[in-house]
Image (tube, rainbow, N blue to C red):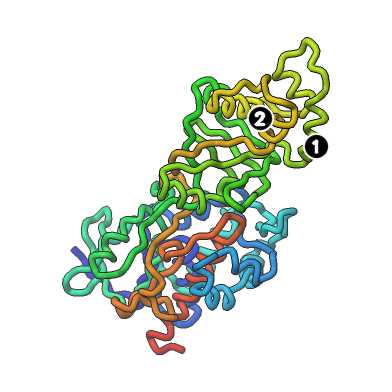
Amino acid sequence: MSSTHTHVAIIGAGPAGLMAAEVLAQGGAAVTVYDAMPSAGRKLLMAGRGGLNLTHSEPLPAFLARYAEAMPNLNAAIDAFPPQALRDWSEALGQPTFVGSSGRVFPKAFKASPLLRAWLRRLNGLGVQLALRHRWTGWHENGRLQFQTPDGQREIDASATVLALGGASWPRLGSDGAWAETLAARGVKISELRPANSGFTVPWSGIFRDRFEGQPLKGVALTFGARTVRGEAIVTRTGIEGGAIYALSADLREAILSKGQATLHVGVRPDLAIEELTARLSAPKGKQSFSSFLRKAAHLSPVAIGLLQEAAKTSGVSLASLSPADLARLINAVPIQLTGVAPIARAISTAGGIAFDELDANFMIRRLPGVFAAGEMLDWEAPTGGYLLQASFATGAAAGRGVLKWLGAE
């Protein structure tokens, strides 16, 4: 066993932890970042596979509204480090950004690795130390931080600590949610960790599953309750996922958790009015098969036709027996029964975490003086589109400023 002194310990080398490290080092603190993985920023690199959607370009009031009930708790942090500040920060690291057609913001390199490498070089220049393969296991009775390392147990003295261990999605990248039990044992209130921006399970028939697994439903309109989202979804072997699904995932998840199921309606030709669809479907079928008729008359893809057939089979109705008007209505409101939420390990992000009333205005855990928390450990969720990373960066910066105040450096 060894004992080493460090001024500020940051646990977690993701966006929130590394941003806290940068703020602290620039403020004159000695900083060591501990992480259980063999390298830093693994989840950031995973996000980069899709181009690294850093933030979003929409006006700040609309941007903040994306955080729903967590908005009041995140306002100050994001206002202090808003989307434009994040873009400026990226450009200062040699990674200028651009706004995509959807308003999402990406590095021009369209990947995470150049940004992460430049960031780690900056942190190294600021004197930030990285201690990898250090899995945090809590506190020793003497108050020191405890880590499990390849060389055995290690204890660390810290004047302050920033916890930035992420949620519980993609545990193989380091965020396994094990910290929740450690903090709960200290009396910290933790909202249950739940999958966010996740897929859902659907009891597809074997025929549909085997034929259409991995197929996209493009340009669809998904409706649940009063909300409709346009976008894309993907049929999986066990259900459905994709960007448009993620946008509704919070409402769908809560419905399933409370009622055991949720019915999602899919419009596969949302660009066509019911009247126009009805007129097209009233044309003579001739000798062609019904599937061929649907493909030609309504310009439906094979997976869309398969979806209609699944719905008809579930309801015990023959598609061919429907009137053109009823068929048109079904095409733009195909019911899909969701019976479960995909496992949290496969979710893009996590809902739940440390309750905000456990934190002070500087992101310090009230019950644990000198211990701060940031990023996805906190009880907030947001849709994809840059909101997840923006809040992680912003709360990391806020926690770093909070530590400086705690240490009397501000």
Viewer-nearest of labels 2 and 1? 1
| Position in image of residue 337 (x %, y %) | 51, 37
Kindly identify which residue carries mark 2: 304
Looking at the image, can residue 159 be seen? no
Q: CA distance from mark 2 to mark 1?
A: 19 Å
Could you tell me the amino acid type at mark 2?
Answer: Ala
The answer to whether residue 288 is left or right of residue 117 is right
The quarter holding residue 164 reads: bottom left
Q: Earlier in the sequence, mark 2 or mark 1?
A: 1
- Which image quarter is the N terminus in? bottom left
Of the residues shown, which amino acid type is indicated by label 1? Glu
Question: Residue under circle 1?
Answer: 275
**Which corner quadrant of the image does residue 214 belong to?**
top right
Left or right of 184, for residue 359: right
Relative to 211, is 265 above or below?
Answer: below
Q: Nearer the viewer, residue 23 or 228?
A: 228
> Measured along the vertical axis of the image, is residue 263 above or below residue 228?
above
Considering the numbered disc 1 on the image, is that residue within a helix, a strand or a loop? helix
Residue at image point 69% right, 61% down? 97
Residue 86: image location, x then y, percent? 61, 68
Q: Which of the two residues, 168 or 192, is positioned nearer the viewer here?
A: 192
Quadrant for residue 8, please give it. bottom left
Return the x and y of residue 194 as percentages of the image width and height.
Answer: 41, 53
Mark 2 element type: helix
Q: Which mark is residue 193?
A: none
Residue drawn 63% across the image and 72% down it: 85
Kindly check if marks 2 and 1 are in contact, taking CB atoms under 8 A apart as contact: no
Q: Nearer the viewer, residue 93 or 199?
A: 199
Residue name at image x 78 percent, y 40 percent: 273
